[in-house]
Image (cartoon, grey):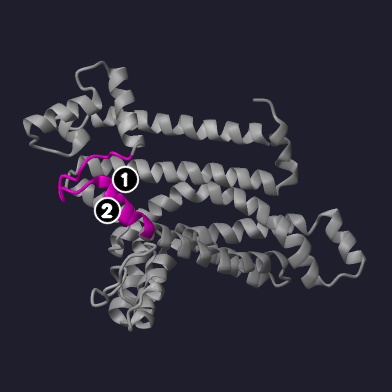
């Protein structure tokens, strides 16, 4: 198992270096001075200019420049934002929790509703119900996320006035950040209106989370249905039925755990599209996460923000993909032979 984990760690390191290399090359294509593109300081003083050249080895060859660039970025030095004049690393740490919170809530919604519907679609004896569920998932998968977000905002936010359509919480509530997750921070606050603030934060996250959850929800339903259909035809399920076990026990204790293993693998494959959808959702609902921060940096030509946002999103996707692959290998007995593969 140690060899397997080392191979996956080497894969993460190699992918990260390749990503940094692409960003290093792209940085030199920006239509600005290379020192400005790397540091975010447009008009540096003489001292700052010397420091920038020293940090990034701008007077050396391309290989030395790449090594210096990788060292600075991996050490957390992303320069300063040309717009806010603040360190980009500080801004990144401020917006990351909001994106994680939105992604987690959307993922929970997709799993809580998607897995049961997938099981029903696989086990139901009513053809109309099966076709209705699968047609609904196909429709949800085909709907453009921006159209869905705007439609939900119009009906539930503007027309009916049930839910807020922008932001993470009402600006009237002053909540001190503790974890960065607004739902937790409102409950951890010692403010007398923390319950009201929690309700307001919950209302704010409903529309963006539901919009973001549609894509993974449809995939979860279809994968769960296919996996359950396959599992229910296995020999051990027929043996359990022959022993007189109840249908509920067979499904919950024998079939469903094995059907969820393929779902875990497909979750890893969904991370890329899920991240791109999240960026669109954050922009539509003015959600203060990495996506809206990155798009704002693109509009304002804030080159250090662009580099940092792309690097953060890409590295998170790579890390989570490898982590899910490891978990899938551990959960799937047929894949555990990977633990003993050659290097």
Helix, strand or loop at mark 1: helix
Q: Assess disc 2: are there few (<14), some (14-19) or many (≥20) residues with their C-alpha within 10 Å of its C-alpha.
A: many
Q: Nearer the viewer, residue 140 or 8?
A: 8
Mark 1 and mark 2 in contact? Answer it, CB < 8 Å: yes
Residue plotted at (60% across, 58% down): 222
Residue plotted at (35% across, 60% down): 281
Q: In terms of sequence position, does the residue under pointer 1 or pointer 2 come before the other?
A: 2
Residue 231, placed above or below residue 81:
below
Residue named by callout 2 = 293
Q: Which residues are magenta?
A: 76-97
Residue named by callout 1 = 309
Residue 145 % position (x, y)? 38, 59
Rendering quarter of residue 147:
bottom left
Residue plotted at (35% across, 73% down): 204
Between the residue at mark 1 and the residue at mark 2, the CA separation in whole angstroms equals 8 Å
Q: Nearer the viewer, residue 242 or 62?
A: 62
């Amino acid at each position: 198992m140690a060899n397997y984990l080392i191979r996956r760690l080497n894969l993460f390191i190699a992918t990260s270096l390749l990503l940094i290399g692409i960003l290093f090359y792209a940085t030199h294509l920006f239509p600005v001075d290379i020192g400005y593109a790397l540091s975010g300081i447009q008009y540096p003083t003489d001292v700052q200019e010397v420091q920038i050249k020293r940090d990034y080895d701008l007077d050396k060859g391309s290989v030395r420049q790449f090594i210096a660039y990788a060292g600075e970025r991996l050490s957390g030095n992303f320069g300063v934002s040309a717009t806010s004049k603040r360190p980009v690393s500080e801004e990144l740490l401020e917006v990351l929790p909001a994106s994680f919170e939105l992604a987690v809530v959307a993922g929970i919604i997709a799993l809580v509703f998607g897995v049961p519907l997938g099981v029903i679609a696989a086990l139901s004896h009513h053809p109309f119900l099966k076709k209705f569920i699968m047609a609904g998932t196909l429709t949800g998968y085909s709907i453009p996320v921006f159209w869905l977000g705007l439609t939900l905002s119009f009906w539930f936010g503007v027309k009916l006035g049930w839910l807020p359509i922008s932001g993470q919480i009402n600006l009237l509530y002053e909540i001190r950040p503790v974890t960065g997750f607004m739902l937790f921070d409102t409950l951890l606050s010692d403010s007398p209106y923390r319950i009201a603030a929690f309700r307001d934060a919950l209302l704010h996250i409903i529309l963006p989370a539901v919009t973001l959850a549609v894509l993974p929800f449809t995939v979860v339903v279809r994968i769960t249905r296919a996996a359950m259909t396959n599992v229910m035809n296995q020999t051990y399920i027929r043996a359990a039925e022959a022993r007189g076990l109840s249908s509920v026990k067979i499904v919950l204790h024998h079939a469903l755990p094995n059907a969820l293993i393929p779902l875990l693998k497909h979750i890893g494959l969904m991370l890329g599209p899920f991240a791109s959808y999240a960026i669109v959702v954050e922009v539509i609902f003015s959600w203060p996460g990495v996506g809206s921060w990155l798009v704002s940096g693109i509009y304002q030509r804030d080159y250090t923000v662009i580099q940092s946002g792309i690097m953060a999103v890409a590295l998170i996707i790579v890390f989570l993909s490898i982590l899910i692959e490891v978990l899938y290998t551990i959960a799937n007995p047929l894949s555990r032979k990977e633990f003993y593969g050659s290097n």
